[in-house]
Image (cartoon, grey):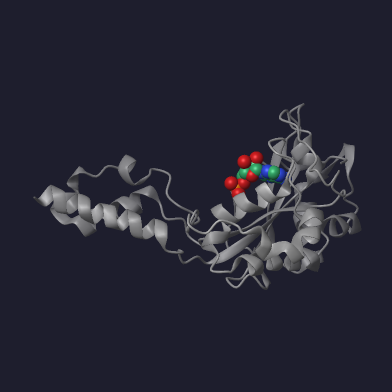
């Protein structure tokens, strides 16, 4: 009997966590350098609207927790709620890696294209797909909405409108160019000069992510700017990120 109650409790716990939008602490506005997406071994394809401009493109607006909830914390919480009946739970049951962000908060709320029809021209320009799967940016936006947007507490139109407005505040490629960091297939730049340029040019610290080109060279891939819970104002990033960046990075031509 105890076991049945324990399972029922666990089930309702999991169901509740998947159906309600979770509380989060800030957003990451993630912008991507297309040259660094395209020159990996995997390569890229241009969308049906043509080759995107040589500027940073939006990857997503992602709700994030200020403190990751570790697998062990989740385990302890579930066991505490189940009392003796929770002894059968293992780290594998609740997830070993823990959670640093909410995702897929409402599977019953897919992106409805007509809700964002007035934004499509701007989204095509600023949030283009580079994936070879479909070539249609709408699929990329739908995926980002489903995974991250449904946890944002924003309506579909507001979610995309705010991401576009935040991107429009600062042209990251121009900010970097102002500091002498321009696309090149030969030059490398000190990682600290990239973060300093962004902090100075936007007024706020950001996190940086790198990847490797087909020759294994490290390059700036994505810039994570931090944004308040309303998705309106930039803030200093409250969390450092583990990143694959090295002291010197490239910014490949696109
Ligand atoms: P996410 O799950 O939101 O972290 O996004 C990761 C997924 O987005 C991966 O499947 C990537 O391949 C895909 N992705 C990243 N950048 C782009 C892009 N510019 N166009 C299309 N898909 C992308």
- Most foreground residue, 50 or 24: 50
Residue 85 appears in the picture as rendered: yes
In-image side of 193 versus 148 (left or right)? right
Looking at the picture, tell me which residue is in the foreground, 134 or 174: 134
Looking at the image, the residue that sits furthest to the front is 114
Question: What residue sits 69% from the left and 68% below the top?
Answer: 162
Instruction: Classify 49 as above or below 132.
Output: below
Residue toward you, 27 or 66: 27
Q: From the image, which quarter does the C terminus lie in? A: top right
Against 185, residue 228 (above or below) is: below
Q: Position of residue 147 (x, y in %)?
A: 55, 52
Relative to 227, 215 lies left or right:
right
Q: Is residue 245 left or right of residue 45?
A: left
Return the residue found at the far left. Answer: 1
Residue 97, percent from left and from top: 43, 44
Tell which quarter ligand 1 is in. top right
Q: Please state the horizontal and vertical placement of residue 175, each as a whole percent of the image.
A: 85, 60
Q: So how many labels did they put on this image?
A: 0
Identify the residue at image location x=84%, y=47%: 52
Q: Is residue 148 left or right of residue 44?
A: left
Residue 98 vertical placement versus 202 (above, below): above
Q: Quadrant of residue 95?
A: top left
The quarter holding residue 202 reads bottom right
Q: Would you say residue 236 is visible in this rendering?
A: no
Q: Nearer the viewer, residue 4 or 157?
A: 157
Please name the residue shown 68% across and 36% down the image: 133
Q: Position of residue 164 (x, y in %)?
A: 74, 64
Name the residue rendered at 75%, 42% in the picture: 130
């Amino acid at each position: 009997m105890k076991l049945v109650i324990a399972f029922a409790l666990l089930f309702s716990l999991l169901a509740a966590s998947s159906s309600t939008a979770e509380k989060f602490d800030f957003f990451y506005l993630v912008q991507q350098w297309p040259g660094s997406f395209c020159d990996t071994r995997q390569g890229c394809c241009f969308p049906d609207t043509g080759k995107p401009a040589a500027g940073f493109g939006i990857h997503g607006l992602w709700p994030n927790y200020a403190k990751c909830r570790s697998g062990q914390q989740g385990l302890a919480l579930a066991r505490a709620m189940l009392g003796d009946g929770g002894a059968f739970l293992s780290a594998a049951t609740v997830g070993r890696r823990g959670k640093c962000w909410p995702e897929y908060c409402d599977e019953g709320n897919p992106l409805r294209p007509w809700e964002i029809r007035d934004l499509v021209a701007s989204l095509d320009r600023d949030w283009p797909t580079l994936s070879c799967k479909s070539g249609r940016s709408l699929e990329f936006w739908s995926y980002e909405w489903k995974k991250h947007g449904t946890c944002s507490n924003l309506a579909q139109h507001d979610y995309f409108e705010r991401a576009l407005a935040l991107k429009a505040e600062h042209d990251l490629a121009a900010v970097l160019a102002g500091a002498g960091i321009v696309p090149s297939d030969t030059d490398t730049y000190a990682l600290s000069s990239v973060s300093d340029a962004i902090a100075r040019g936007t007024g706020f610290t950001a996190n940086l992510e790198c990847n490797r080109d087909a020759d294994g060279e490290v390059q700036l891939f994505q810039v994570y700017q931090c944004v308040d819970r309303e998705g309106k104002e930039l803030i200093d990033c409250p969390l450092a990120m583990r990143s694959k960046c090295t002291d010197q990075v490239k910014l490949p031509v696109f």
